[in-house]
Amino acid sequence: MMRKLLACKLRRTSLLFVFCAVFLLAAGFSKSWHIDAHYWWILLAPVLLGLRKRSVMALLWVVLFAASLGFWRGGLYQDKLARFDNYYGQKGTVTVIASQDAAYGKSKQLTFDTKHVIIDSTGERLTGKVSISGFGLNAVFAGDEIRVAGKLRPSLGSYQGRMSFGQMTLVEHHNSLVNELRRRFTAGVQSALPEPVASFGMGLLIGQRNTLPPGVTQSLLMVGLTHIVAASGYNMTILLRSADKVAGKRSKRLKLLLSLGLIVLFLLFAGTSASIVRAAIVSLLSIATAYYGREFKPLILLLFAAAITAYANPYYVWSDIGWYLSFLAFFGVMILAPLLQVNWSARWKESIIACVALESICAEIMALPYILHTFGQMSFVGIIANVLVVAFIPLAMLLTLIAGLAGMLLAPVAGWFAWPATLLMTYMLDVANLLSHVPYAFKEGIGFSTKQMLGWYVVVGSLVLALKRKADMSESDTITEKKSKETDFERTLQVVNNQA
């Protein structure tokens, strides 16, 4: 029995699944368990040799290698983040590079994020995301080098620090062609469309939501539509579907080049935030596997993308709420929704509204327990709002693009090109506003324990396994029936030949 177990071969996809899962677990536990794994590279040779045989011993080497790599990477990143502790609560001056154009936030301060922080007194460079707010400048653009005097404090979520009420001075203005085009396009949208439609359109197109009025932001939150104004996988999915419709039937190479070009343009104009990078990784992996005719299981695809992003920044696994929500929504859209669509009729599968409704429901099923556990809030009209609004997002993005280009190039007559976008997005905002005023549409203070959240996901996982087994059995029956029909046809043909 033991010999048979040791002699059996495992699939490479199974080994990849185990590697990603163990690495994510090790990276997550590395925050609490400090294990010295600096010699993880010694296990690389046995892993590479074991992949050829794909035996149970190879699985053991993969587990050891993934665990040591996860603990090593997590420990290394913790050492970098620990340097912040030396400066928390101290007044000083830092030099930063703005990751985005600044917007006015609370207390009428210019607010922006930065990933490049240098302590002027020591010259030490800190690794991590920091929020900067303060006064002294009329505007701060992406790429600008700014000196800020203030007090560095710890922060929550994906931020490692924050500095509020700082005094800003411009060190150097770093402009780029991409940033200049983005600003000109934003100005074109704002000149062609009225507010808050212009800000809403920029949110749909490239995820720029820091200019949305507080009332619109609150309405979108209450009806569960905040995700549509965040540059994420949905925006990129729309672009890739468009590329597939334009070039899918003409040339596989043309489709590949067009898809890659759209991803690059989206990254340049929307920025490289964590959610956009995650969506880009998932999209690139999907494109690569489709181009080479390979079948990449969605679950392994998501785990692989999660492992890549966690290796780049283990802090995602430790406390980044957006990281968890994005992959939970990905799971609902890429795994749960297709399994539920298997038994649909062809009429329902061709309906955009029905597909969007199902994807929204599945994403909500996966994300809701985590939201309840973390925030304790829930929208009871989210599904209705998504069905009424989300199906029109592709058209709204296209019309916003037309309006922005008209504002850039044909300012005197931009209004004639912009009125369809104004009409459609006014409808979308009105839906959000009306549903937000429905009694008991939004509930806060809902308690949801860790056990309840895990229990929910156990039930969903069991449902996914049952649907997967049913789909496999249905596919197997279809293949068997097809072979049976081919055999009957061959027998009939043989009888006819014999008679002839």
Image: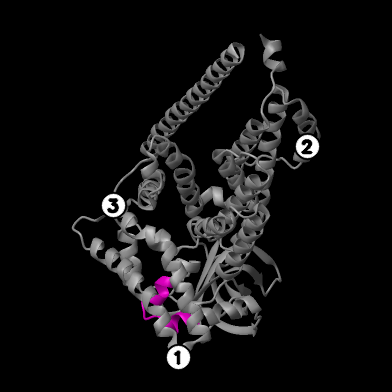
Discs 2/1, front: 1
Alpha carbon separation for disc pair 2 and 1: 64 Å
> Could you say where residue 116 lies in the image, as x and y percent from the top left?
64, 68
- Residues rendered magenta in the picture: 187-201
Q: Is residue 363 above or below residue 136?
A: above
- Element marked by disc 3: loop
Q: Residues within 10 Å of mark 2 (few under 14, many from 20)?
A: some
Residue position for label 1: 412
Residue at 64% x, 42% y: name it: 34
Image coordinates for residue 206, horizontal then vertical, percent: 50, 68
Q: Quadrant of residue 266?
A: bottom right
On-image quarter of the N terminus? top right
Q: CA distance from mark 3 to mark 1?
A: 50 Å
Which corner quadrant holds the C terminus?
A: top right
Compared with residue 150, is residue 309 higher up or lower down, i.e. above or below? above
**Residue 44 image label:** 2
Between label 3 and label 1, give the one nearer the viewer.
1
Q: Residue at x 59, y 84 (%)?
A: 169
Find out whether residue 200 is within the magenta segment. Answer: yes
Q: Residues within 10 Å of mark 1 (few under 14, many from 20)?
A: few
Element under disc 2: helix
